[in-house]
Image: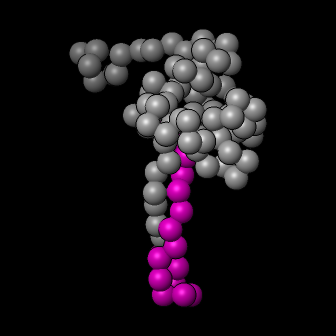
Amino acid sequence: MNRTIREAAQVLGLRESALRAHLRRTKAVNNDGSLAAKHVGGGHLFMDARSRWVEQRKQYSHYAVLMVTEAGIAWLAAQLGVTVTITKHKDAAA
């Protein structure tokens, strides 16, 4: 399951701003919030292209959202020294 930076920060027990600061410090993310070139296709982080309709201009506005993969959650947890417990999905337990 892919997560936004906000959701990933919640899973890791951090504030979103702290996680973004860590990603900037480690040069995984550029200062403008976009994914650094060396991490494109790395399997941990990716940019998800999205769009929304702007009624006032009668056209779509396009933007990108930084996303974290499940492997990226484990990767970030190891970097930050956070313990992440993996549990079975509630439906798979039956």
Q: Which residue appears at 67% of the width and 13% of the height?
A: 81
Q: How is the structure coloured here?
A: one colour
| Residue, far front | 38
Horizontal placement of 88 versus 67: left or right? left
Q: Is residue 75 above or below residue 23?
A: above
Quadrant assignment for the N terminus: top left
Along the line of sight, the residue nearer the viewer: 60 or 41: 41
Query: Residue 31 appears at what percent x and percent y?
Result: 73, 48
Horizontal placement of 83 versus 44: left or right? right
Q: Is residue 91 magenta-colored?
A: no
Q: Which residue appears at 51% of the width and 84% of the height?
A: 55
Residue 4 in view, yes or no: no
Q: Is residue 66 magenta-colored?
A: yes
Q: Which of the 4 image quadrants contains residue 93?
A: top left
Query: Residue 68 appears at what percent x and percent y?
Result: 51, 36
Query: Residue 25 appears at what percent x and percent y?
Result: 75, 32
Horizontal placement of 3 versus 28: left or right? left
Q: Which of the 4 image quadrants contains residue 75?
A: top right
For the stretch drawn in magenta, the main secondary structure is: strand
Query: Residue 7 appears at what percent x and percent y?
Result: 56, 38
Q: Which residue appears at 42% of the width and 14% of the height?
A: 87
- What range is drawn magenta here? 53-68
Quadrant assignment for the C terminus: top left
Along the line of sight, the residue nearer the viewer: 93 or 49: 49
| Residue, far left | 94
